[in-house]
Image (cartoon, rainbow, N blue to C red):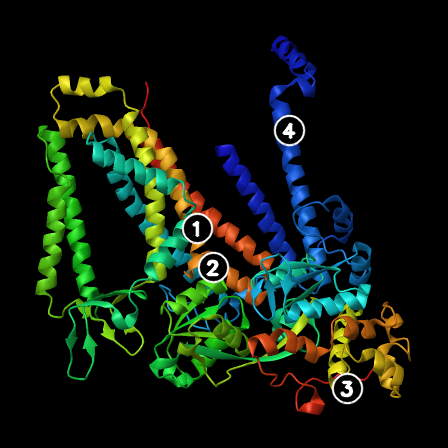
Amino acid sequence: MEDGMSLTRPNKTNIPLWQDTHKRQILAQFIFAVLVIVIVSLLYGNIIDSLSEIGMIPSFRFLRMDSNIDISESIISVDNTSSNLRLIVSGFLNTISISFLAIIFSTILGLIIALCRLSTNYLINKLAVIYIEIIRNIPLLLLLLIWYRAFFLKLPGIKEAIIFGKTLQEGGQTQLSFSLSNRGISMAWLRPSDHFTPFLVCMAIAFVVAIALGIFLKHRENHTGKEQRIILFPFLLFIGLSLISYALLPNAALQKDIPVLGKFNISGGLHITAEWFSLFSGLILYTSAFIAEIFRAGIQGIPKGQIEAARSLGLSHMKTIRLVIIPQAKVVIIPPLTSQYLGVAKNTSLGVAIGFPDLFAITGTIINQSGRALEMIILVMAIYLTLSLLTSLIMNLYNSRIQIKER
Amino acid sequence: MKKRVTLAFVLISVLVLCLSCGGKQESPEPTTTSVAAPAVAAAPAPVVKEKTSTLQQVKDRGYIVVGVNASNPGFAYLQEDGSYTGFEIDLAKALSVAVFGTPDKLEFRPLTSKERFIALQSGEIDVLIRTATINSSRDTELGLDFTTPYFYDGQTFVVRDNIGINTMEDLEGASIAVLTGSTTETNLAAIMASKQIEYRPLTFENLDEMKSAFINDRVDAVSVDKSSAVVFLAQFEDAGDFKGLEETISKEPLGIAVRHGDSAWKDICQWTLFALFYGDEHAITSANVDEVLSTTTSPETKNVLGKGKEIGAMMGLSNDWAYQIIKQVGNYGEIFDRNLGIPMKVTRGYNKPWNQGGLFYANPFN
């Protein structure tokens, strides 16, 4: 025992601190952390000093004050008596809703373009190349401005709007089912009525039943080794049960919301403003060009031997794609795709140029109206960081799940 | 990758921690902060160490940095050759004459309405002359000081002539565009809410985008200040198709803004304005100022023109500062006519001296 101690101890203590790699690393980390804290607190103290000199001590109290401004579109209801915080939330919702939809649609469009790009048909192939090269080389801001000013604003005005399904009601109201003008798109829409809750309950039950069926089918597949339609049948069951419950319920769960032509604008129905649609379509056009190239890289990165091997095993064309190409392509595609998705969320901030009230536009206005630049910038940075880290986290989790496990 | 994320978290949390502590108390440790200032002078946050007065800074630097608009014809406009012209530019020139004796010691910083106050707070500019409406929250919360107004404006609407809009009530259900970050935006929201008129707002950051939305009939009306409405209309080729409404929905007194807490510098801006008003009140123009100087018997006029009390010296300026302003730039009326009255057909309205039925009143030079 004593021998052992005397053998190991001198060894450990004899190593000087600057030669012990492990300790050195910890020390370096510690010094760096201290340095960061010192610099940040110095900066902070300096800012506080300067601000209090002109009588502005930073505080977040202004978030609870009335905003005094109206914004053009919002998912939650806001007016000029809403607090600044509520306005920020509304801007945040605008940002995430538009980026979420843009991500989905640009992925679909990107996939289609990538397939065109891989096509052996000369015309389709070259058209895809031209599309990708042109879009990728135009700055997004320019694309948005062209799209908004040269296309959407040049659509017919509200008086000459393109209208379908126009009917004159008794009260002198003009109803319509679809209209397109430079104010945006209005169309008839279904909205939840007062009797929506029972239907929601029925849908939840249908969902649970469908999941149960899915589990049962999976179980049977494992048991018998026979392939089952695990996705299709539960899905059809869910749709079927929902439709039956809708028909059987005494009060209609959804009601029609039909647009009405007013003196200046069309009210009611689903209204998509020209600004929203410009930003949305601009983002899709721009992002899909990048995504198409990512998909192409992923698919072309698979060695030809893999496909030949699949064929020689007797797999059909669809099965080759589903079981051999996609699983391997995904591994290459996901990381760069994540960066593209992150980019979409940040690019929505360009909506400020065309009058779309996203998070950035609204915070800019609040900064100006309240004068709280420092606080707002910190808040916006924190929100965008959270959003990006969240997207990144989801994609990384997915990525680690699909990585090829090499044993 | 993981390390970096952690690092980012640490950074942010430290920042947030600092802030949440600091919100409650005043500057946490005065000893460290005073050491801090020189060490981080080159850091991104602009340092507003105003131990020396703005006047001294300006004199040391040799020119005044003025925050202006670059795209507001008549008031301040960046011309093709890179020079600025307009009413507010001439006010800046008067300030330059007061401090340096010549009208060209200026550097113009074009700013949007969003950026303007931050630029002033952070010390990037010395003075802001950019159609800034004076109101209580800006005066107190934003850490600014304003001179008395140099222009009395009011907000109105520009609409198409042929769609039967004559009063504000006719705008029920209309789409209305405003510039974001202006008092126009808050006034519009307030008046529409109080009159219970439903409308659809559309906010733009840039005047050009707003104009093109209006011309293309994306919006039914544009809400702007009356003076801007006249200028706005003057730019359209088919201006006959548009009109401004008679109603004025707000008071918009425009003033020169400086940082809070430097009253010597504010005095200079204020009395420069008063000198311009005084010239207008007493019909002292750039053409007759020499004649007035040699013939006047009024002690106040002598004070203004530098032959009586040493008013200039008390403000740290040369004694003939006001004489030079009127001689080189002209009085208020001349500046108005040159930039707004003659080319833009803006009427004087309230922007006249008190003895001619307006609101300008130069405090006595005694």
Q: Is residue A160 shown above or below A223?
A: below
At 68% from the left and 71% from the top, the residue drawn is B256
Q: Is residue A198 shown above or below A342?
A: below
**Does the image show residue B366?**
no
For mark 3, does the 10 Å Cα neighbourhood hold few (<14), some (14 to 19), or many (20 or more) residues?
Answer: few
Mark 3 vs mark 1: give the one in front: 3
Secondary structure beneath dot 3 equals: loop
Please determine if labels 3 and 2 lie on a single subunit: no
Which quarter of the rendering shows the C terminus of chain A?
A: top left
**Residue type, mark 1 in image:** Leu
Residue B347 placed where, x, y %?
Answer: 58, 83
Mark 2 to mark 1: distance in Å? 15 Å
Q: Pointers 2 and 1 in contact (CB under 8 A)?
A: no
Please determine if labels 1 and 4 lie on a single subunit: yes
Label 2 chain ID: A
Residue A106: name its quadrant.
top left
Mark 4 vs mark 3: give the one in front: 3
Q: Pointers 3 and 1 in contact (CB under 8 A)?
A: no
The disc label shown at residue A28, or none: 4
Label 3 chain ID: B
Residue B29 placed where, x, y %?
Answer: 74, 52
Looking at this view, is A233 or A180 the one in front? A180
Please determine if labels 2 and 4 lie on a single subunit: yes
The disc label shown at residue B282, or none: 3
**Residue type, mark 2 in image:** Ala
In the picture of the structure, the residue carrying the numbered disc 1 is A141
Mark 1 to mark 4: distance in Å? 43 Å
The disc label shown at residue A361, or none: 2
**Residue type, mark 3 in image:** His
Residue B169: name its quadrant.
bottom left
Mark 4 to mark 3: distance in Å? 74 Å
At 11% from the left and 30% from the top, the residue drawn is A223
